[in-house]
Amino acid sequence: MNTFDMSRRGFVRLSGVAAVIALAGCDSSAGGGSASAGDTFMIGGIGPVTGAAAIYGSATKYGAQVAVDEVNAAGAVKMELNWQDDEHDPEKSVNAYNTLKDWGMQILVGTTTTTPCVAVSTETNADRIFQLTPSASSVNVLGGEEIGADSPRKDNVFQMCFTDPNQGTASAQYISQQKLGTKIAVIYNNADAYSTGIYQKFVEEAGALELEIVSTQTFTDDQTDFSVQVGDAKDKGADLLFLPIYYTPASLILSEAKKQGYAPRFFGVDGMDGILTLEGFDTELAEGVMLLTPFVATAEDEATQAFNEAYKAASGSNENPNQFAADAYDCVKALAQAIETAGITPDMATDAMCDALIAQFTDPGFSYAGLTGESSWSVTGEVTKTPKGMVIEGGVYMPLDA
């Protein structure tokens, strides 16, 4: 089974939007360092829309397109979106980036997954093209194992999603605050930077909060048998199983727990969003699974419901959008707000545009209220927002804190 090292999350009132799919073609145009010849900002997007990770890239593609349509309908800023498929492959992602540069891209929304984003962010930093990723959550995307004064920083790269360490810390705090478990087991992928990063910060924060971790088990990307990991958690009496992993291995763990007659509480992270659409998965196994997320599609506020309908129209699907779609939507809308606030124009060279966007996003007075919360950014490129609890009930995601 495959796992994916990506990730990555007020409300705004949404306007009506035409049902338009994301643009996929490329035209020969000015290079990435050139200004736009017209009055339209050229927005590039990269993410897997084919292959095993397509659920993530397709969500970000359509989420971004919904936002572009709304921005254009509002009229203050005009945008054109060109989305390229990278199949969750770093080399193909760099090729996609070069294709977008040839097309005339001025700003990049992407990439969707982490390993490609690390590769592409090196290119955008060298080329001075502003980059805002919806879901690539590793700190390496921003420029180092630990962002700080002594660590290299790709100052043009920003995240709309939580960083991996922040997910681990927030998960431990939420479990402690809500008193969800007294004996905790953890199963994580020690071959995956996303999973490992969350695990390490979770353990650190759990220690500070005096949460008792009774079992820690690992696995690698190609593992399909989780009988040992689940068995150890069961034998140690864990009443909560923390899974800082993606939904494919999580589905196997849930199946194994049922096989062993083990029924703890299950708590996951954003990589588990999408488990209900996994082909061949018995969704009843996910009943009661909890996770932290910046977006819950079943929330009843007007903004969320309007986005759901626009997303379904754009994607041609009856499936509700996931958090990756909402984060991509927020990327585009935040960019439009920053462009308008800073007075940035399409005829600016990309390096000047990049500098102006960096200054705007790091301005202490700048924030964006979107689908995934009230967002502001530090000079590290990390976003600050409040996560929400979500629980699977009756085969749908429901707000945990309602």
Image (cartoon, rainbow, N blue to C red):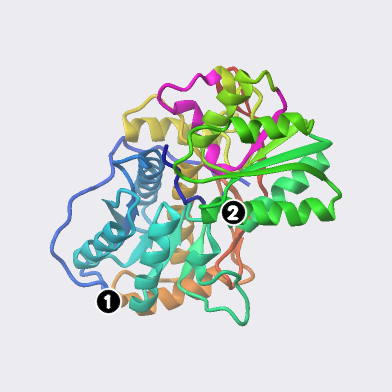
Q: Which residue is mark 1?
A: 33
Task: Depth check: give the residue in front, 356 or 132.
Answer: 132
Q: Which residue is pictured at 57% across the width and 28% down the height?
A: 298
Q: Which residue is mark 2?
A: 196
**Quarter of the image with the N terminus in it:** top left
Q: Secondary structure at mark 2?
A: helix
Q: Secondary structure at mark 1?
A: loop
Please state which amino acid type lies under the numbered disc 2: Thr
Q: Where does residue 134 sit, x and y in percent of width and height?
A: 47, 53
Q: Where does residue 196 sit, x and y in percent of width and height?
A: 59, 54
Farthest residue toward the bottom? 150
Q: Which residue is pictured at 31% across the width and 69% down the height?
A: 346
Q: Is residue 95 above or below residue 290?
A: below
Residue 290 in view of the camera:
no
Farthest residue toward the right? 210
Whole-Å distance between the Cαs marked 2 and 1? 37 Å
Q: Where does residue 225 sit, x and y in percent of width and height?
A: 52, 32
Please tell me how crowded label 1 is: few (under 14), some (14-19), or many (20+) other residues with Cα within 10 Å: many
Query: Which is more foreground, mark 2 or mark 1?
Result: 2
Q: Is residue 334 left or right of residue 177?
A: left
Q: Which comes sooner in the sequence, label 2 or label 1? A: 1
Span shown in magenta: 263-283
Q: Which residue is pictured at 39% across the width and 51% down the height?
A: 71
